[in-house]
Image (cartoon, helix red, strand yellow):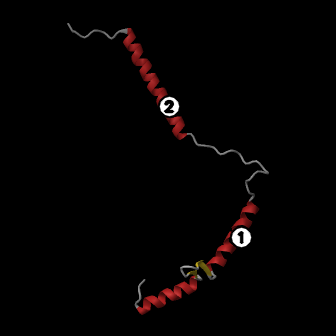
Amino acid sequence: MSDAAAPSKSGLTLTFAAAIGGFAIFVIILLVAYLPQRPAPLVPGTSAKTPAERKDALAELRAHEATVAGGYAWVDQSKGVVRLPIDRAIELTLRDLAAGRKK
């Protein structure tokens, strides 16, 4: 005969409860990790901008960037650092490279 005894009813119940508990913890972790965070719906009259307002803001930003990229200005006057138009900076860089100067 075998020395192994049949599992007791309390041991079987404990094993079943542990399996159900483990599955429940797994499901909770999945829900927390994978549920999308949905943004609040947009309410008219709040800080959200309309497409026309965003388009105007973008046009204003691009105009400012074009002015900055195409003009001269002091970056740090005490150190003698200036901002040049891109075309002029390219010309000066090519001239320096052609002369063999490296900075």
Q: Residue at x 78, y 50 (%)?
A: 44
Give how far across and how far down residue 93 sits, in percent.
Answer: 49, 86
- Residue in the foreground of this view, choosing between 56 and 100: 100
Disc 2 to disc 1, how far (Cα)? 49 Å
Where does the image place residue 19, in percent across and percent down from the top left? 42, 23
Quadrant location of the N terminus in the rendered image: top left
Give the structural element (helix, strand or loop) at label 2: helix
- Judge by depth and name the residue closer to the eye, 17 or 92: 92
Residue 79 location in percent, x, y? Answer: 53, 79
Quadrant (top left, top right, bottom left, bottom right) of the C terminus: bottom left
* 86 and 27: which is toward the camera: 86
Q: Nearer the viewer, mark 2 or mark 1?
A: 1
Left or right: residue 61 compared with residue 32: right
Secondary structure under tag 1 reads helix
Query: Which residue lies under the disc numbered 2?
Result: 27
- Where 43 falls versus 75 (above or below)? above
Residue furthest out toward the top:
1
- Callout 2: few (<14), some (14-19), or many (20+) C-alpha neighbours within 10 Å? few
Q: Amino acid at mark 1?
A: Glu
Query: Is 87 located above or below residue 40 in the figure?
Result: below
- Residue 1 badge: none
Q: Can you identify the residue that label 1 sits on?
A: 60
- Type of amino acid under label 2: Val
Q: Which numbered disc, 2 or 1, marks the residue that appears first in the sequence?
A: 2
- Work out whether 4 lies above or below 65: above
- Tell me residue 47's x, y (percent): 74, 53
Badge count: 2
Going 69% across and 67% down the picture, which residue do you hit?
A: 58
Q: Residue furthest left?
A: 1
As drawn, is 2 to the left or to the right of 103? Answer: left
